[in-house]
Image: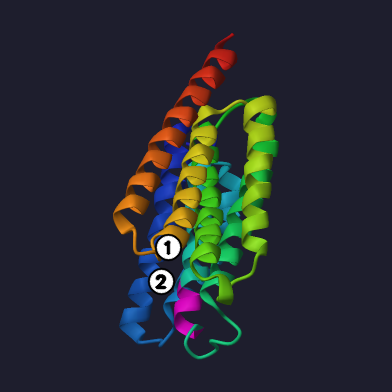
């Protein structure tokens, strides 16, 4: 069928998935004793030539997912043993760097062709979700985390606004940024205000802030949609 045919690409995608099934079968049959992260790392390495040849967005996302899983399980395997070297935030930083780098490369390549926007949105969601989690961790565990997380979060918002508001308009990513702001601001308010004895008043104030920011964000997104259509 060839790799230019849709059926050929779909067959290559299925074959790439079956590689993982084969590795799992080998591991169970011969009791290799390999860790889970080694399975996903080997899987990603073995299908890389197919990923490069296929030029298929779904196959690239599968490959990136395998890298993310290998990183996650690597931390889960060695996090307790080398706790001084590997902290929860460090694993989040690695995942954030991986997905943000992939997003930047993919967006640069796809900017001219304006294709595979759904895949770019998935990567933007992963990148934005991870930096939001890092910013929240900084607010909740200030003593044990670095302030670089908050600076990186501001930088991510600024770059996302520049790219997806003016260069490659995408309301989905902008909406994700608005949600990230609401979540981080709410986390900061809750961390500081719920320590007082006036819990009911604090909860009411936080609720009003969430409603106000949601309304303001919704109005701004409507204007962004109107400008994108005009």
| Residue holding disc 2 | 23
As drawn, the label of residue 141 is none
Whether 203 is drawn above or below 67: the answer is above
Seen at 49% across and 56% down, the residue is: 188
Q: Main secondary structure of the magenta part?
A: helix
Seen at 53% across and 63% down, the residue is: 139
- Image coordinates for residue 90, horizontal then vertical, percent: 58, 72
Dividing the picture into quarters, in which one does residue 114 lie?
top right
Q: Nearer the viewer, residue 27 or 160?
A: 160
Label 1: element kind: helix
| Residue holding disc 1 | 19
- Image coordinates for residue 36, horizontal then vertical, percent: 42, 76
- Image coordinates for residue 102, horizontal then vertical, percent: 62, 50
Q: Contact (CB < 8 A) between labels 2 and 1? A: yes
The residue segment tinted magenta is 73-78
- Please indicate whether residue 173 sits to the left or right of residue 33 in the image: right
Dividing the picture into quarters, in which one does residue 94 lie?
bottom right
Seen at 44% across and 48% down, the residue is: 13
Label 2: element kind: helix
Observer able to see residue 47: no
Observer able to see residue 11: yes
Q: Nearer the viewer, residue 191 or 77?
A: 191
Q: Label 2, label 1: how many angstroms apart (C-alpha)?
A: 6 Å
For disc 1, the neighbor class at 10 Å (few under 14, some 14 to 19, many from 20) is some
């Amino acid at each position: 069928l060839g790799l230019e045919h849709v059926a050929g690409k779909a067959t290559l995608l299925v074959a790439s998935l079956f590689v993982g099934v084969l590795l799992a079968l080998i591991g169970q049959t011969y009791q290799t004793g390999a860790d889970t992260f080694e399975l996903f790392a080997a899987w990603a390495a073995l299908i890389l030539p197919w990923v490069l040849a296929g030029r298929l967005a779904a196959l690239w996302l599968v490959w990136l997912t395998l890298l993310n899983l290998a990183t996650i399980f690597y931390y889960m395997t060695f996090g307790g043993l080398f706790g001084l070297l590997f902290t929860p935030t460090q694993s989040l930083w690695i995942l954030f760097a991986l997905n943000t780098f992939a997003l930047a490369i993919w967006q640069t390549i796809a900017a001219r062709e304006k294709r595979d926007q759904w895949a770019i949105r998935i990567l933007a969601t992963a990148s934005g979700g991870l930096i939001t989690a890092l910013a929240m961790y900084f607010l909740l565990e200030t003593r044990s985390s670095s302030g670089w997380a908050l600076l990186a979060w501001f930088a991510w918002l600024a770059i996302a606004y520049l790219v997806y508001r003016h260069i490659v308009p995408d309301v989905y990513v902008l909406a994700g940024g608005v949600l990230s702001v609401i979540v981080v601001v709410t986390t900061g308010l809750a961390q500081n205000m719920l320590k007082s004895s006036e819990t009911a008043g604090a909860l009411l104030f936080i609720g009003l802030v969430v409603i106000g920011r949601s309304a303001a964000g919704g109005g701004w997104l409507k204007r962004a949609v109107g400008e994108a259509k005009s």
